[in-house]
Amino acid sequence: MVAIGPHILRNPVVLAPMAGVTDVPFRELAWKLGAGLVVAEMTSANPDLWNTRTSRLRREATVGAWPRVVQIAGADPEWIAAAAQREVAAGADIIDVNMGCPAKKVCNQAAGSALLRDETLVARILGAAVAAVSVPVTVKIRTGWSPEQRNGVTIARIAQDVGVSSIAVHGRTRACRFVGEVEYETIAAIKAAVRIPVFANGDITCVEDARRVLAQTGADGVLIGRAALGAPWLPGDVAATLATGRLPHTRSVGEVVAVIVAHLLHMHEFYGGEQGVRIARKHVKAYLQRLHIDPTLVRVFNDRQTPEDQLRFFERFDVAGAQMRAA
C-alpha cells in the first residue's frame, strides 16, 4: 500500500492532473472506474484569480473521491502558502505544488517547470507550503529544465528535506515537453535518493507499461495522464490488473457509449448548456477515436449545438455497427 502522509491510497495508480481535462466530471468518472487517486486541475496561486469562475470550478470537490487533492502553481512563496491555506480551509486533504507544467504561459510566469532552474526558490516555495498547512504537501516535477540542466535528483532531495510527503516525476525535462523517450533511469535515481514515495509519470498507456516502469524505476506508483483522455477507466483497469494479474475487461462499444452518455450528462450539468456543449466535444472526440470508427462522426457530433442534440447523437448511434442510424 502507498501512503501520502496519513492517507493510504486504495491503489497506486493515479490520474494525473491535466488542465482542461481532469475537471470534476472526468475525475468523478475515473474515481468510480477505479483510479487510486484523482488530482484536480492546476489552479493559480495568484489571489486575484481566486474567485474567477474557472478557478472556482477547478477547485470543486469530486463526489466520493478521497483524499481530495488540489494542485496549485505559482512562483511566489507567500502566494503559494496563502493559496494552500485557502484550499485546506475549503476542504483539501493534500496540497500538490506544480513544478512540472511545461506550458509557455505558465513558464513565462516563472512557475511550473520554470522553477526547476532556481533550486533556492524551489526550497522557499515548498518550505512555505509545508509550514502553512497541517495536511501533506506533494510536488510534481520534471527531470530538469533541459537535458543540460537535469537536476531532478537535487530537487527531490530539497523537497524531502523541507517536509514534502511525496514526489511525482514526469520523466522528461521542460525543454523536451512531451517529445522523445522518457528518462526512467532518472526517475530511478530520484527514487533511490529519497525515502518518501515517488510516482513515475510519462508514456504509461497500458498495464504492460506500468509494470515495466515500476520494475525499472522502483517507484511506489504511477501517474497516468494523456492516455486516460477518452479512457477514464484506464487508471482503474491498470490498478486492477496489477493487483490481480488478470487482464482488464475489454469494453464493448455499448459499454463505452454508456460511459460517454454519463460523462455528457455530468458535463452539461456541471458547466451549463453552452460551455458544457463546447467542453464535451474534445472528450467525445477522444472517445470516438478510441472506438476506431468513421472519423466523420466526430464532425457530425461537433455540429450538435445543444445538450439535447449531443445526447440525441448517441440515441441514434448504432452500437452493433458503430455507426449512425438513419434519421
Image (spheres, rainbow, N blue to C red):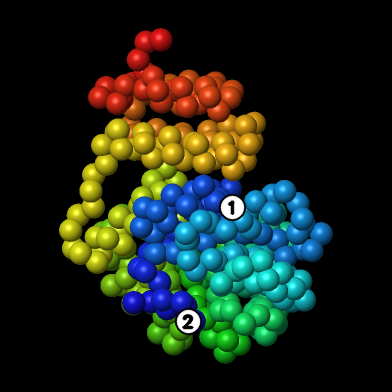
Q: Is residue 177 visible?
A: no
> Of the residues tagged 2 and 1, which is closer to the observer?
2
* Residue assigned mark 1: 19
Dot 2 or dot 1: first in sequence order is: 2
Q: Horizontal placement of 262 versus 150: left or right?
A: left
**Extreme-bottom residue of the structure:** 161
Left or right: 108, with 231 as reference point: right
Relative depth, front residue between 318 and 166 = 318
* Quadrant showing the N terminus: bottom left
Residue in the picture at 52% in, 41% down = 266
Q: Residue at x 37, y 69 (%)?
A: 10
Which residue type carries mark 2? Pro
Foreground of the two, 264 or 225: 264
Quarter of the image for residue 259 reads: top left
Q: Residue at x 36, y 36 (%)?
A: 258
Q: Is residue 275 above or below residue 229?
A: above
Task: Note whether 207 is above or below 156 in the view shown.
Answer: above
In the picture as drawn, the residue positioned furthest to the left comes out as 246
Q: Is residue 169 left or right of residue 235?
A: right
Q: In the picture shown, does residue 38 fall above or below 3?
A: above
